[in-house]
Every structure is written in C-alpha cells, then in structure tokens.
Image: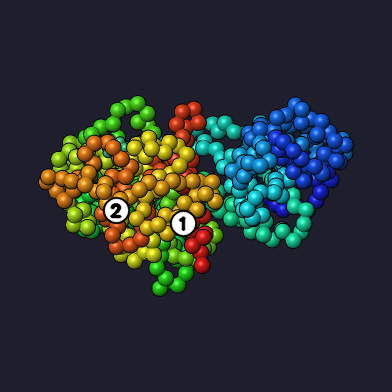
Amino acid sequence: MEYEVKNTTAGTHRSACLIAGVYQDGDLPRGTADLDRASDGLITRRRRDFDATLGSSLLLFNLPGIKAERVLLVGLGPRESCTLAGLRKAVTVAVRVLAKTGVGTAATLLAELPLEGVAPGARVRAIVEAAEQASYRFEQMKSKPKSTGKQLRRLSLLLTSRSANTDAERNIEIGRAIAGGIALARDLGNLAPNICTPTYLAAEARKLARRYPTLKVRVLGEAEIQRLGMGAFLGVARGSHEAPRLIVFEYQGAARSEHPLALVGKGLTFDAGGISLKPSANMDEMKYDMGGAASVFGAVVTTCELGLKLNLVGIVPACENLPDGNAIKPGDVLTSMSGQTIEVLNTDAEGRLILADALSYAERFKPRAVVDIATLTGACVVALGHHATGLMSPDDELADELLAAGERAGDRAWRLPLWEDYQSQLKSNFADFANIGGGRDGGAITAGCFLWRFTRKYRWAHLDIAGTAWKSGRHKGSTGRPVGLLAEWLIASNP
Ligand code: BES
Ligand code: MN
Ligand code: ZN
C-alpha cells in the first residue's frame, strides 16, 4: 500500500473515505471534533447508534459540509485507556471494513490522535504497520487468488502542521520496513512444508543477498556441517531425506571492527517429533516450527531496508525432524560442536539440539550479544498462552532492552527465571547432560537452561515463541512475531 502525508483540515479533505476516531466517553478527538463542527454536529448525534468500543466501526455516507464521500468512524474505547495498541486495533478494523467496501483510497485523522507518552512518529509508524498487517494476504498456493483488486491502495495521513511532515515521512519508511520484514516472516511460515524446505530457505536467503548489497549470505551443506563437528544438529537431520542447511547472513552497516549483534533462529521446516512421534492432531502446524528462522529473515530484511548503522549476523540451522530407519533414537548420545555430550531422551526435543550447535557457531563472530528465537516448547504456551513470548536471559540489561522493545512494538515478551536451580533437571547417567528435564515441570525454563550451556562466551537471551509465532483455528496462519520486537531492538541499538 502507498502512504502519503497531507496537510489539510478534516472537513475540506477530498477522499473516498475519511477514517476518524471516536472515544467511548467525553469529547471527540480533535480532528473528529472538526468534522463534527463542519457537519453541524452530525457525528455527535450519530454517537447514539455507535458505542465506540475498541473494535467497533460505523460507516457514514454523504455527510453535509464534509468533502469526503464517506466517513468511517472507528471506536477507540474509553479516552483514559486509549493506547498505541488501541490505535493499532482501530486501524486494523478500518482496513478490514474498507476491504469489504472496495474503497481504493482513504485518508485518516488518526496520525494526530493524542496518546500519553507516545511520540508523533511512533503513531505514524504504528498506523503503517497495522495497515500493512491488516491487508496481508497469503494466496500463493491457491490456484485462483480470492482477493480481487478491490483492496485499499493508498492511505493519506492528515496532519494539521507542515512542521511534522519530515518526521512523519521518515516514520512511514520505518513502518514499511518493519511491515516488510513481518510479511516475509509470515510468508515463509505459511508456505507448505513440502515447499519451504531447508534448501528453499537457503535459496530465499541467497535471493536477499542479491537484492541488498550490504548483505552477504553463506550456506553450509551437510559435509561442511559435519566438518564443523555439529553432531547435535546432524543428529536431528538424519531422520529426514531432506538435506540440512546452515544459513548465515552477514549484514555490514558499520565498520568491520565493530562487533555484531547476532540472531539465531530455529529452522525446523517440519517437526513430526522423530521416533518420539507426535500425535497426529494438528500436526500440520509443525510446519511453523521454522518461525524463529523466519523471524531472523524478517529482521535481516528490515535492517537492510533501513540501512541500520550496525553489524548483524543471522544464523539459521534448518532441517526436518522425521522418524526414519536412520533417525536418532531415545538413548542415543550425540557430541555437540562444543564438545559437550548429550543424551537424547526424547527426539521431539530437537530444537535445542540444532540450536546448541548454531549457538556454538555464533562464537566465531565475537558478538556483542546473541538472541535466539525458537518455537521451542509447548510448556511455554502453557505458561504464557498466546499473547506473550517467553524471554529468558541471565543478563538483566539485555532482558530489559528486549522487554522494552517488545512493549514499544506491540509485540510483547515476558521474562521467565533462568536460574542455576533448574539445571539439575537435565542430569544424565550416561552423557554430560540430557536433552529433556526429568518430568514436564518448568519445561520452557529447562529448555532455556539447556541452551544456556552453549552460550557462556557472550551476552545472550532466548525468546520462546511457541505460543506467539502462529495462530490456530479458523484464522490459522503465521503472525510474523517477533519481527516487530527484534526490529525495535535493532533500531534502538543503532548508534
Ligand atoms: N516444536 C516443538 C514445540 C512446540 C509444541 C511448539 C507445540 C508449539 C506447539 C518442540 O520441538 C517440541 O516438540 N518440544 C517438546 C519438548 C518436550 C519433548 C520436552 C514439547 O514441548 O512437547
Ligand atoms: Mn519437537
Ligand atoms: Zn520443534
């Protein structure tokens, strides 16, 4: 979609539809109050038919005194509790309603909605991100696309003062760059697992390197992975005929001497559980087990688009976890790249195995900090549900940065304790430690503790996105999370 900044007053702006916010109580927001005056109080009178709860909307036609053909009122809920999240929700609703009417261009007054403690630029960014997310469609695999050309093509952001234009335009670009990263992550997640294989991911990575001169990509095949001694990664990959890939992005936006940030994403393009086979109900959803990898792709693209002045490394171990005559079995002992030996007590705890080696590999970049992103445990979904990503880190400062970035992005995480106390659950009688804790209790944390053993050489945080990377049910699909969080964190790390 196209976005532009316009300096006009609400009543005189000509457009097919003007989107205006209404609070549930008290006065109208300023732009909407202008419209109300221009139409001789018509909006005030219509408030009786419209409760203005967050998520509600009312489409009005031919308002006297107003140049726009339509006015779409969107509910903002109670004035006191209206936040950036409320603004995002209102924009989402507006885009969905307009998609049904076939209006091609619209304008909105929401860019000037007053929000406590929110910078004007952040408002613009949120509007663009929400509008892009709401108009996202995934129809690549349908023989005939369902959506017609009726979609919203252009959204004008109305600002009363010219002095805010430059800041708004810059934030439109930032919003688009973030939304582009989110859309890529959603596309990769939604693709069928027979198409989105490790080889496919590697080819997509190479495509990105051709698109951005600041980005280099290296793809390591089975032989090189073997040479590196990645016994844990290769152990998982053995159960599938699909060849594993280790994909390495290197983005250079600062001097070579500057230590990079690193993102490591779990890239299980399908997780059937291996010999510890999963039950068949909803097993299709395990195509999303590469959500961490997809978020690395998304964050890399956003970084390239914005030309951030930092160095970034993205590491994606990609393979499938299937049961096969050659697959690893419960009881097998694997030697990881770090030299530590792992007793595989459950082959379905495979994400931590491939991440272990990818995290050891990250050491060679001497990173300032490493964040891994993984659809790692069902236990994290039990703990936090589908709203918050699980964050674990021994580093309070890094944890706080990521929590704050998630808060700003509307892509929140919540911290779980990562204490030595939990480590004892991983004891093994035969190897250095096991890949699962005895018993299911604290499963998200014991998984974090397992990864911790491979990250002692740098600052590190772990994001468990098992509950947030996709939605189940009728609206099944990838969410693109936590690209928003990662992008905010990277932007904030921009010197
Ligand atoms: N990819 C799954 C985690 C998962 C499960 C994400 C359900 C989203 C929904 C992971 O590889 C896995 O199977 N984890 C096991 C670990 C267990 C065997 C210790 C789990 O959570 O059941
Ligand atoms: Mn698994
Ligand atoms: Zn998995």
**Which numbered marker is on residue 364?**
none
Judging depth in this view, the residue of 331 and 307 nearest the camera is 331
Residue at (51% x, 64% y) in the render: 494
Mark 1 crowd level (few <14, some 14–19, many ≥20, 10 Å Cα): some
Residue at x-position 17% and y-position 38%: 330
- Residue in the picture at 85% in, 35% down: 41
Label placed on residue 452: 2
| In this picture, residue 266 sits left or right of residue 17 | left
Image label count: 2
In percent of width and height, residue 451 lies at 29, 51
Q: In the depicted view, which residue is nearer to us: 220 or 49?
A: 49
Which residue is identified by label 1?
401
Q: Residue at x 33, y 50 (%)?
A: 418
x and y, in percent, of residue 409 in the image: 54, 49
Residue type of the residue flagged with mark 1: Glu
User: Where residue 93 appears, x then y in whole percent?
Assistant: 63, 36
Q: Amino acid at mark 2?
A: Trp
Residue 300 picture location, percent across and down = 46, 56
Left or right: residue 24 compared with residue 437: right
- Mark 2: which secondary structure? helix
Question: Which residue appears farthest toward the left when viewing the image?
Answer: 430
- Give the class, few, some or many, for how many residues have Cα within 10 Å of label 2's Cα (few <14, many ≥20): many
Dividing the picture into quadrants, the one containing residue 369 is bottom left
Frontmost residue, 188 versus 421: 421
Above or below, 311 relative to 129? below
Q: Taking the image as drawn, is residue 234 in sight? A: no
Q: Is mark 2 within 8 Å of ligand 1?
A: no
Q: Regarding mark 1 in the picture, which secondary structure is present there?
A: helix
Mark 1 or mark 2, earlier in chain: 1
Q: Is residue 344 above or below residue 224?
A: above
